[in-house]
Amino acid sequence: MDISATPPRLRDLHDYQRLLGARVTGGAANQMLMVALGWQMYDLTTSAWNLGLVGLAQFLPALLLTLPAGHLVDRHDRRGLLAASLGLQLLAAACLALASGRGWVGPNLILLLSVLLGCARALQMPAQQALMPTLVPAALLPRAVAAASSTMQAAIIAGPALGGALYALGPWMAAQLESGASPDAAAHWGAALVYSVALLMLIAAAFAVLAIRRRPTPAGRASPDWAQLTAGLHFVWQRPAVLGAISLDLFAVLLGGATALLPVFARDILHTGPEGLGLLRAAPALGAVVVGFWLARFPITRRAGHCLLGAVATFGLTMIAFALTTSFLLAFAVLAISGAADMVSVVIRQSIVQLETPDEMRGRVGAVNSVFIGASNQLGEFESGATAALLGPVGSVLLGGVGTLAVVLVWWRIFPALARRDSLHPAPT
């Protein structure tokens, strides 16, 4: 080996750049789909319960398929599996675009295609995470992960804003292409436009993934081993710091998240349209990006446990403030602060999980972590919709914010080692 050789730069790693482009393009398309699905479902039903069902329809297949998908990723071509997951998403986008344009769309179809999206994500997350380390030298992996995370946050900002703006073009499109169209038809024109643009972006992402050179398939067992599949669960259960960190996020976001109810708040409380909904969905990512850059320059070096619990408590307080405001600008600012607090939580939590997990267990523990993340997001959307059906949207978000504060107090007591964690260094053995 020539030790004097100059190490490659990330920009020179073409396969990594293709993966990065696919992540950003596919991520933005997925965010656009979520904006359109939420607004269209609420347009069709005016039901917070049905908004919650969209999250549940995406969570259940992800819950059932995540561990088998992780095993599949370790035995087959990760590039092909990632492209297949994008193919399932573009199939859903194509069906939604056609049904919206022709006026066939209904709540049942939206829920059915949400199940398909959940299946796709169960395969996408482990394939995406496992593929990246094979595309960059080990020395560049931390920078590669940081670059991927930053660009993904940009997609989370741009996707909802673009989706909301395209949806708002529906009435203008209907007026230009179909004179005398009803308001409902005009709204579906906007949804069809969002789905069509998302479809094109997903096609581009799939081609970018397929352009990556195929790597050797990891050796694996001929058939799944149940003990191997569940080893990550056993590991997490036996490590209080890891269990406390990932379960804190699960219950905090499960109770405190308001994403599913944003269409209700946007239209009925803040009196804005789909373009406003897109901005509200982008606000947390904007706050997360700002804090992410700050933490990259000034990392947390002390009192990590207190910072983690404090960040989650701040998240709960922002949900309470969001529930009580009737100002769009204030709601946007509060959601941005919630994203900033969540980024602090994410950085500390993921650092603890990685530091406590040996290399040979990272994949299986990562699969467990993805189940917890999916539960906090999609199942949290169902919880929000269900409680909103009983208490109204304001009552639902208020209860969730108070519940998040209660979770912080309980976790402070039952996971004292997590609360006392000082530095983000490996815990002593």
Image (spheres, grey):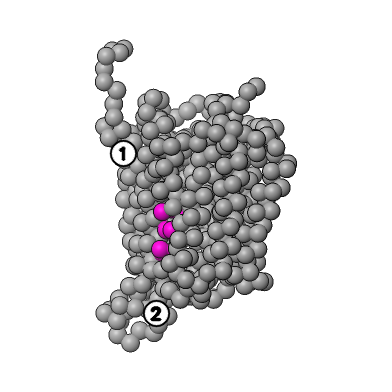
Disc 1: CA contacts within 10 A as few (<14), some (14-19) or many (>=20): some
Closest to the observer: 220 or 147?
147
Q: Residue furthest right?
A: 414
Asked whether, in this view, residue 402 is left or right of residue 79, the answer is: right
> In the rendered image, which residue does mark 1 sit on?
17
Vertical placement of residue 30 versus 151, above or below: below
Q: Is residue 93 visible?
A: no
The magenta stretch spans which residues? 277-286
Give percent across and percent down for residue 164: 38, 66
- Tell me the CA gap for discs 2 and 1: 40 Å
- Disc 2 residue type (three-letter): Ala
Q: Is residue 143 magenta?
A: no
Vertical placement of residue 109 versus 62, above or below: below
> In the rendered image, which residue does mark 2 sit on?
185
Residue at 43% across / 58% down in the picture?
283
Q: Is residue 244 visible?
A: yes
- Disc 1 residue type (three-letter): Gln
Asked whether, in this view, residue 9 is left or right of residue 353, the answer is: left
Q: Is residue 278 magenta?
A: yes
